[in-house]
Structures are given as structure tokens and as C-alpha cells.
């Protein structure tokens, strides 16, 4: 059963039950109140009639000594205000204006000092019958009076009929109102259901309009937050899928070219007789491509290994650290005619030496490949961090490529691939190493001006408890 039907049926059942119960209680209460008034009136009238009978018996006391005169009770009953019956002490009827089918069962409840009453319906009429005992000298008799309350009963029946007419009309109008209100209440939920179906079909941009501050509005806001999270996750998954596709495509490309060349030159060496110069040239090419494949495989292994982050950082003098790393670059810098300068404030930092060396060498190597003539390494304290900048004056990186240059196998300038044995893994590796050291790899660049890469390292204290001076 749909939610609309549940709401509608529940509201209709509650309304029907509430109206019926209210009508029953109202009519029953009114009828009982009317019966109670009629009973009080009948008992009061009985007391008055009883007094009248007793007064008549006293007045006619001398006449009653010789027996009850003929027509005495007929005349006496004419003076009373209700249907009357006189019953002897042996329960024989002396005089009665009551219907013949009257039940005199209330005699069992009558005593010399109490009276009783009962309700009877006789021949379609309703009566209140009140009875009591009258004792005068040697005469004992029962006096019964019957008051017709058929009008009260008829009034109750009329009220029932009126109530059912009003009940049917009210119920009909209420059903229409409940139907409209239920539809209005369910409509936002239907919108949420349709929006969820659209998102399930791939429309991840679907959102709900704000619908107030009630629970439905809160549900809509929560739905929008969920949709935002789903869209972000789908975008992230799509990006990761695209990166993996690029990874596979570029890796396959990187392997294909050197392998084809290696196989070709090796086959030539195996099948043909070549001059020493040709053999040397072929062997040199095989060596070069082999070195490229070795570098590629090592970098891929580094990327896999760097998936873990449980490396131990050690305290090192930043000046000595940079000096040890850059010392191995002297031949390359001299060959490329690149000037390397350092401007480092003394301090101790927390690093993993081998990984950090790989990071610095990759960044300097990228600067050399970008055609830089000058590379500068600066370092200064910033609160509890030590900021290192590698600044080059190379060709720079276009703004459109800055967001992707740390992706594996991504290369903005693909012409450098064969020339420098590159595979687009250097900055991806560098970014992971920076993360291990608790810092993002912050890269900024201006085309034709140069590139700056910023790394923030954790500062450490020397054995004296103060920042130790390092000689640069």
C-alpha cells in the first residue's frame, strides 16, 4: 500500500471514530440527563400524589370503617396527575389506569418506608413507574403512578437521526479536505523520490528546492547534502578512473617505444654482421633505452612503496642536508651550465633522508629540464615549520596544467619524454614524498618566468633545546 493511501485511510478512520464517539457521548449524555430529570419529576409527583391519597383516606376515615365505598378509587384517581393503580396487600388490583401488560416486578423493592421506580416500554410507549406502600389504620395498599416519557425517547431518536445526517455530511467534506491535505503532504516526499530516481539514473546534478523549516525541509536539505556527497564521490571516482586510464595508456606507451628499439637493435646485432662502429652505436642505444626502462621501473616501484606512510623521520641539520643532496649534482649542473644558489636560515628539521633526497633531486632535475640557467634553494622558519622553496627561471608551467602535473605519467611538455628519459612520474613521486613529510607540494608558476615549489617541514630542536645554527 502506498504512503498516500496509508495517510488517507488512517486519517479517515481516526476522523470516523472520533465523530462517532463524540456523537455517541453527546447524545447519550443528553438522553441520560433528560431521563434523570424526568425521573426526579416523576418521583416528586408521586410524593405529591401519595400525600393526596393519604389526605383523602383521613378525610373519608369514617366512611371507610364500613368498607371502601363504590367508586372511591375512581374519584381519587381523577384528582391525581398521572396514570394510577391501587393494589391491595395481597397484590390484587383494586383499581388501575395502567396498561394490562404492565410488569409489577418493582413490588420486590418496596418496603413500608421506601418507594421504588422502574422503566418500562408498553405498547410502544415508555413509562417511568413509581410505586410505594400506604398504610392507614388497618388498610394497607400499594400506590403506583406511571409517567409517560415517550417524548424524551423520541427526542433521543430524533437527535440520532439528525446526528447521522450531520455525520455523513461532515464526513464527506472531511474526506475531501483530508484527500487534499494528504496530497499536499505527500507531494514533497514524491519530489524526493523522483529526485532520488533521477540520481540513480545518472543525473547527479539533481537537487531539491528549499521547502521551509519543517521536517520535510530538513529532509530536503539532508537529501541535497547526500546528493552533493554522491556527486563529489562520483566526480572523484571518475577522475581516478581517468587517471588510471592515463596511467595505463602512458605506461604502455613508455614501454612500447624503448622495447621496440631494444628488440630491433638486438635482432640486428644477432642476425647481421656489423662494423665495430655500428655495433657500438647499437649497444649504446640499447644501453640508453635499458637505463630508461630501469628508471621507469624504479619510479613505479617507488610509487607503489610510497603508498604506505609509516616512514621514520629523523632530526637533521638543514644546511648539511641540502649540501649533501646538491653535492652530487655538480657534474650535471656544470654540464648544463646551471647555477645553483642557496639561502638557508639555520635550523634542524625532521626528514627521511633518502626520500627527501629523491624529492629535492627530482625538483632540481625538473628545473634543469625546463631550461633554467639558475636555480635557487631558500629556507626560513615560519612558526613551528621550516619552509623550503626551490625556485627556477625556466620556461614555466601553463595554468591549465598546474592541477594535473602531480598525476602519474602526466607530462605537459611531451616532447621532453624521449630526450630526458622521462615518464611523467617525477612530480607524482615528489608529491607523495612531501605528504609523508606532512606537507603538500605547493607549486606556482608563470610562463617564461619560472616555477617555485614550496615544501614545509617540521622544525626540530637540537640537543641544547634551541634551534641550532647550521653553517651554509
Image: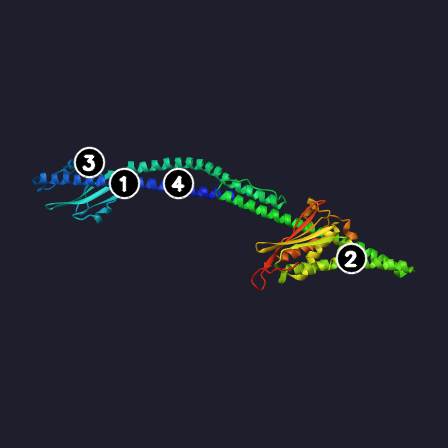
Nearer to us in this view, 159 or 263: 263
Residue in the image at 67% along x and 51% along y: 453
Of marks 4 and 1, the one in the foreground: 4
Name the element at disc 3.
loop
* x then y, percent, for residue 360: 69, 56
* 163 horizontally vs 59: left or right: right
* 148 horizontally vs 395: left or right: left
Q: Earlier in the sequence, mark 4 or mark 1?
A: 4
Q: Which residue is mark 2?
A: 292
Of marks 3 and 4, the one in the foreground: 4
Res 118 quadrant in image: top left
Res 207 quadrant in image: top right
Q: Which residue is mark 1?
A: 35
Q: CA distance from mark 3 to mark 2?
A: 131 Å
Structural crowding at the residue carrying mark 2, measured as other residues with C-alpha within 10 Å and reported as few (<14), some (14–19) or many (≥20): many
Q: Determine whether 61 is above or below 332 in the image.
A: above
Q: Earlier in the sequence, mark 2 or mark 4?
A: 4
Q: CA distance from mark 2 to mark 1?
A: 112 Å
The label shown at residue 293 is none
Name the element at disc 2.
helix
Q: Earlier in the sequence, mark 3 or mark 4?
A: 4
Q: Are marks 4 and 1 in contact (CB under 8 Å)?
A: no
Q: CA distance from mark 3 to mark 1?
A: 19 Å
The label shown at residue 81 is 3
Q: Earlier in the sequence, mark 3 or mark 1?
A: 1
The label shown at residue 19 is 4
Amino acid at each position: 500500500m502506498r504512503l498516500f493511501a496509508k495517510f488517507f485511510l488512517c486519517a479517515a478512520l481516526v476522523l470516523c471514530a472520533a465523530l462517532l464517539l463524540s456523537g455517541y457521548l453527546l447524545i447519550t449524555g443528553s438522553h441520560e440527563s433528560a431521563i434523570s430529570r424526568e425521573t426526579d419529576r416523576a418521583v416528586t409527583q408521586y410524593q405529591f400524589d401519595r400525600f393526596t391519597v393519604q389526605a383523602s383516606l383521613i378525610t373519608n376515615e369514617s366512611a371507610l370503617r364500613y368498607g371502601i365505598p363504590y367508586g372511591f378509587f375512581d374519584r381519587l384517581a381523577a384528582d391525581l396527575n398521572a396514570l394510577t393503580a391501587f393494589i391491595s396487600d395481597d397484590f390484587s388490583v383494586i383499581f388501575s389506569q395502567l396498561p394490562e401488560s404492565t410488569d409489577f416486578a418493582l413490588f420486590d423493592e418496596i418496603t413500608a418506608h421506601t418507594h421504588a421506580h422502574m422503566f418500562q416500554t408498553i405498547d410502544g410507549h415508555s413509562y417511568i413507574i413509581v410505586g410505594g406502600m400506604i398504610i392507614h389504620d388497618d388498610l394497607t395498599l400499594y400506590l403506583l403512578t406511571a409517567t409517560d416519557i415517550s417524548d424524551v425517547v423520541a427526542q433521543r431518536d430524533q437527535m440520532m437521526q439528525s446526528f447521522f445526517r450531520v455525520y455523513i455530511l461532515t464526513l464527506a467534506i472531511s474526506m475531501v479536505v483530508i484527500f487534499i491535505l494528504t496530497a499536499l503532504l505527500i507531494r514533497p516526499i514524491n519530489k524526493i523520490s523522483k529526485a532520488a530516481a533521477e540520481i540513480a539514473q545518472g543525473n547527479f546534478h539533481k537537487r531539491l528546492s528549499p521547502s521551509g523549516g519543517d521536517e520535510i525541509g530538513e529532509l530536503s536539505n539532508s537529501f541535497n547534502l547526500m546528493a552533493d556527497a554522491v556527486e563529489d564521490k562520483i566526480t572523484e571516482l571518475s577522475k581516478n578512473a581517468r587517471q588510471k586510464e592515463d596511467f595505463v595508456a602512458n605506461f604502455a606507451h613508455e614501454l612500447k617505444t624503448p622495447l621496440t628499439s631494444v628488440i630491433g637493435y638486438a635482432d640486428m646485432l644477432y642476425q647481421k654482421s656489423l662494423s665495430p662502429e655500428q655495433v657500438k652505436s647499437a649497444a649504446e642505444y640499447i644501453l640508453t633505452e635499458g637505463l630508461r626502462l630501469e628508471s621507469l621501473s624504479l619510479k613505479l616501484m617507488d610509487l607503489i612503496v610510497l603508498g604506505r606512510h609509516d616512514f621514520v623521520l629523523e632530526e637533521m641539520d638543514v644546511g648539511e642536508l641540502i649540501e649533501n643532496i646538491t653535492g652530487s649534482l655538480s657534474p650535471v649542473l656544470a654540464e648544463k651550465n646551471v647555477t645553483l644558489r642557496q639561502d638557508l636560515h639555520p635550523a634542524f628539521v625532521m626528514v627521511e633522508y633518502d626520500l627527501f633526497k629523491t624529492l629535492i633531486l627530482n625538483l632540481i632535475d625538473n628545473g634543469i629540464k625546463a631550461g633554467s640557467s639558475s636555480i635557487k634553494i631558500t629556507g626560513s622558519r615560519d612558526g613551528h615549520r621550516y619552509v623550503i622553496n626551490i625556485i627556477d627561471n625556466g620556461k614555466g608551467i601553463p595554468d591549465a596544467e598546474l592541477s594535473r602535473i602531480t598525476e602519474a605519467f602526466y607530462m605537459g611538455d611531451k616532447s621532453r619524454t624521449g630526450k630526458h628519459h622521462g615518464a611523467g612520474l617525477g612530480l607524482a613521486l615528489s608529491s607523495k614524498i612531501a605528504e609523508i613529510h606532512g606537507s603538500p607540494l605547493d607549486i606556482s608558476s608563470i610562463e617564461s618566468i619560472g616555477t617555485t615549489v614550496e615544501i614545509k617541514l617540521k622544525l626540530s630542536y637540537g640537543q641544547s633545546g634551541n634551534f641550532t645554527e647550521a653553517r651554509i
